[in-house]
Each structure stands twice: as C-alpha cells, then as structure tokens.
Image: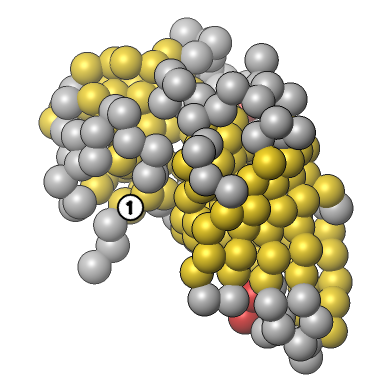
Amino acid sequence: DTAVSQTPKYLVTQMGNDKSIKCEQNLGHDTMYWYKQDSKKFLKIMFSYNNKELIINETVPNRFSPKSPDKAHLNLHINSLELGDSAVYFCASSQAHNSYEQYFGPGTRLTVT
Amino acid sequence: KQEVTQIPAALSVPEGENLVLNCSFTDSAIYNLQWFRQDPGKGLTSLLLIQSSQREQTSGRLNASLDKSSGRSTLYIAASQPGDSATYLCAVGANDYKLSFGAGTTVTVRA
C-alpha cells in the first residue's frame, strides 16, 4: 500500500506548456512538501504545506504554484515551462511541520524540450 | 547558508568489503542529521537519524557517526552486499525544520 504517491512518473513536454504533478499521501500526515532534484543531484525544498496552509515558500519562480485541496493532497502546477525546469520533483510528507522524519514519493521526472 | 558536501561522489567495491561514506556541513548549528538511501525510480528512504546531542546511531549493518563541532558525519556499512547498491544522501536538519541535502554518493557493490 503506497504511502506517498505521485503522478505522473514521467512527463515530457515542450517549452511554454503548462503542466501539473499530483501527490497524495495516505499516512494521515499534516505536512507535505515539494522538492526539486536538479541535474547535480541536489535536493532542494520548494514548498511546504501544513494542514492546507503554506508554511515554506523558498525562492521559486511564481510560475510554480502549489495547491493543497486537503491535507492528503499537494499538487504542483507549473506555467510556461522552461528548459531549466527539467528535473526530478519529489513530494514528501511528515506527521507535523516540526518533524524531520519525512516520507518521500517515487518522484516525477520532468523533461522540457 | 548551510552547504552539505558528500565525498566521494561514487564508490565501487567488491561484495563483503566495508563501506565508508563521508558527509561534511559548513554550519555546525544543526538540529539533526539524516542518512537516506535513494534507489533509481524510487523515493528516498530514511536509514538513520542522529540528533545533534548524539554521537552515533546504529541499525543492523549500518552505523552513522556525528561530530558536530567539526561538521562531519560518516556512514559505515559493514560487509556490503549487492543489494546495498544505491545512492546515499546526507541531510542536515536546521532549527527551522528545513533539510539541506548533499548531492549523494552512488555506491556499486560488485558480486
């Protein structure tokens, strides 16, 4: 039974398009995250939501907009995709915003051509 | 700004050999340090979490040490197996509950 799931697993799209990645967790956690893993393999936090409220918003272009319809879901919408957006995007969840034990999804590999 | 470095970037060893993975961080004011395992096409799995007040943590064949004052952590994997082949990531937890990750060490254990 998957704890943190993401769809799609792979996404290939052209520059200028708008796309969304979905994330769901069935752990009953209050906090969810989006991370970006770039070509150099560094994982960097983008956003964090706690009980549907945005609590972490790193320096990310405003073309990226997270949406949390409920605490089990955190989606990431990206407008006007650019080549530099190509990366692996990971969703994660934790029991609370002050918990360091995070559970990660399998990742979505986004390729912008 | 916290910077986390992992050396070496890649490591290949024969089965049975012990593995030593290094992690260094620039700001010693950390809350904790975690070691994760990343398998291709899969998410990250937490292996060990060391609180800043601890010196080491052990789980089975894995042992992680932490020297906060010198900004270093080492992950030891005893008697490596082909199933240990993966990328190992070190992540430092700050007081604002954010994790800063290193780029990882990719390990290949040859049968």
Vertical arrangement, residue B1 with respect to residue B26, above or below:
above
Q: Taking the image as drawn, is residue A15 in sight?
A: no
Give the SS element for disc 1: strand
**Residue type, mark 1 in image:** Ser
Instruction: Please give left or right for residue B96 compared with residue A16 in the image.
Output: left
At 68% from the left edge and 41% from the top edge, which residue is drawn? Answer: B67
Instruction: Please give left or right for residue B66 compared with residue B47 in the image.
Output: right
Quadrant that contains the N terminus of chain A = bottom left
Depth check: A94 or A15 in front?
A94
Instruction: Please give left or right for residue A67 compared with residue A61 in the image.
Output: left
Q: Which chain does the residue under circle 1 lie in? A: A
Quadrant that contains the C terminus of chain A = top right
Depth check: B58 or A18 in front?
B58
At 24% from the left edge and 40% from the top edge, which residue is drawn? Answer: A95
Q: Can you give x and y, in whole percent of width and height, for residue A21 in the image?
A: 39, 37
Residue A102 in which image quadrant: top left
Vertical arrangement, residue A78 with respect to residue A111, above or below:
above
Q: Can you give x and y, in whole percent of width and height, for residue B39 in the image?
A: 58, 63
Q: Can you give x and y, in whole percent of width and height, for residue B27 in the image?
A: 68, 22
Q: Can you give x and y, in whole percent of width and height, for residue B47 in the image?
A: 50, 60
At 33% from the left edge and 52% from the top edge, which residue is drawn? Answer: A5
Q: Which residue is under mark 1?
A: A5
Residue B82 in which image quadrant: bottom right
At 64% from the left edge and 46% from the top edge, which residue is drawn? Answer: B66
Residue A82 in which image quadrant: top right
